[in-house]
Amino acid sequence: MESTSTQANDILDPSQLLEVLNAFKRGEFEHRMPVDQTGVAGKIADTVNDLLDLNQRYQSKSGHVAIGTTQMQG
Protein backbone atom coordinates (compact mmCIF):
# COMPACT_ATOMS: atom_id res chain seq x y z
CA MET A 1 0.00 0.00 0.00
CA GLU A 2 1.26 3.49 -0.88
CA SER A 3 2.04 6.01 1.81
CA THR A 4 -0.09 9.12 2.23
CA SER A 5 2.79 11.36 1.09
CA THR A 6 3.19 9.36 -2.14
CA GLN A 7 -0.55 9.54 -2.80
CA ALA A 8 -0.50 13.30 -2.17
CA ASN A 9 2.20 13.69 -4.87
CA ASP A 10 -0.15 12.11 -7.43
CA ILE A 11 -2.60 15.03 -7.23
CA LEU A 12 -2.28 17.75 -9.85
CA ASP A 13 -3.01 21.27 -8.61
CA PRO A 14 -5.09 22.80 -11.43
CA SER A 15 -4.50 26.36 -10.21
CA GLN A 16 -0.73 25.79 -10.35
CA LEU A 17 -1.02 24.31 -13.84
CA LEU A 18 -3.06 27.31 -14.96
CA GLU A 19 -0.47 29.67 -13.46
CA VAL A 20 2.36 27.95 -15.36
CA LEU A 21 0.38 27.88 -18.62
CA ASN A 22 -0.57 31.57 -18.33
CA ALA A 23 3.09 32.46 -17.70
CA PHE A 24 4.01 30.41 -20.79
CA LYS A 25 1.40 32.28 -22.81
CA ARG A 26 3.05 35.56 -21.72
CA GLY A 27 6.46 34.24 -22.80
CA GLU A 28 7.70 33.71 -19.23
CA PHE A 29 9.44 30.34 -19.44
CA GLU A 30 11.03 30.27 -15.99
CA HIS A 31 7.82 28.99 -14.35
CA ARG A 32 7.71 25.22 -13.96
CA MET A 33 5.53 22.50 -12.51
CA PRO A 34 6.88 20.66 -9.43
CA VAL A 35 9.23 17.80 -10.26
CA ASP A 36 8.26 15.69 -7.23
CA GLN A 37 4.88 14.67 -8.66
CA THR A 38 4.18 10.96 -9.21
CA GLY A 39 1.71 8.95 -11.28
CA VAL A 40 -0.38 10.68 -13.93
CA ALA A 41 0.09 14.06 -12.21
CA GLY A 42 3.86 13.58 -12.50
CA LYS A 43 3.64 12.67 -16.17
CA ILE A 44 1.56 15.79 -16.87
CA ALA A 45 3.95 18.01 -14.89
CA ASP A 46 6.99 16.50 -16.65
CA THR A 47 5.39 16.95 -20.07
CA VAL A 48 4.49 20.60 -19.39
CA ASN A 49 8.05 21.24 -18.18
CA ASP A 50 9.49 19.51 -21.25
CA LEU A 51 7.35 21.67 -23.56
CA LEU A 52 8.51 24.80 -21.75
CA ASP A 53 12.14 23.71 -22.07
CA LEU A 54 11.75 23.00 -25.80
CA ASN A 55 10.09 26.34 -26.44
CA GLN A 56 12.71 28.18 -24.37
CA ARG A 57 15.52 26.55 -26.39
CA TYR A 58 13.73 27.40 -29.64
CA GLN A 59 13.34 31.00 -28.55
CA SER A 60 17.00 31.34 -27.57
CA LYS A 61 18.13 29.95 -30.96
CA SER A 62 15.73 31.84 -33.20
CA GLY A 63 14.70 34.95 -31.30
CA HIS A 64 11.06 33.92 -31.73
CA VAL A 65 8.51 32.73 -29.23
CA ALA A 66 6.41 29.86 -30.56
CA ILE A 67 3.03 29.54 -28.87
CA GLY A 68 0.84 26.95 -30.50
CA THR A 69 1.14 27.65 -34.21
CA THR A 70 1.67 31.39 -33.73
CA GLN A 71 5.13 32.92 -33.66
CA MET A 72 5.84 36.32 -32.19
CA GLN A 73 9.04 38.24 -32.89
CA GLY A 74 11.08 38.37 -29.65
Image (cartoon, rainbow, N blue to C red):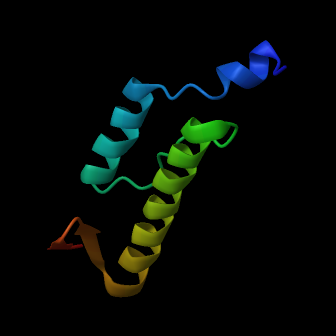
The extreme bottom residue here reads: 62
| Left or right relative to 72: residue 53 | right
* Residue nearer the viewer, 45 or 39: 39
The extreme top residue here reads: 4
Residue 73's spot in the image, x, y percent?
18, 76
At horizontal 40% and vertical 41% (from top left) the residue drawn is: 20
* Residue nearer the viewer, 46 or 29: 46
Residue 68's spot in the image, x, y percent?
22, 65
* Residue nearer the viewer, 42 or 34: 42
Q: Is residue 54 above or below residue 19?
A: below
At horizontal 41% and vertical 85% (from top left) the residue drawn is: 61
At horizontal 53% and vertical 41% (from top left) the residue drawn is: 33
Residue 62's spot in the image, x, y percent?
33, 86
- The N terminus, quarter of image: top right
- The C terminus, quarter of image: bottom left
Residue 10's spot in the image, x, y percent?
63, 29
At horizontal 64% and vertical 38% (from top left) the residue drawn is: 39
* Residue nearer the viewer, 14 or 22: 14
| Left or right relative to 14: residue 46 | right
Quadrant assignment, res 70: bottom left
| Left or right relative to 59: residue 47 | right
Total number of numbered discs in the rendering: 0
Q: Is residue 40 above or below residue 8?
A: below
Quadrant assignment, res 37: top right
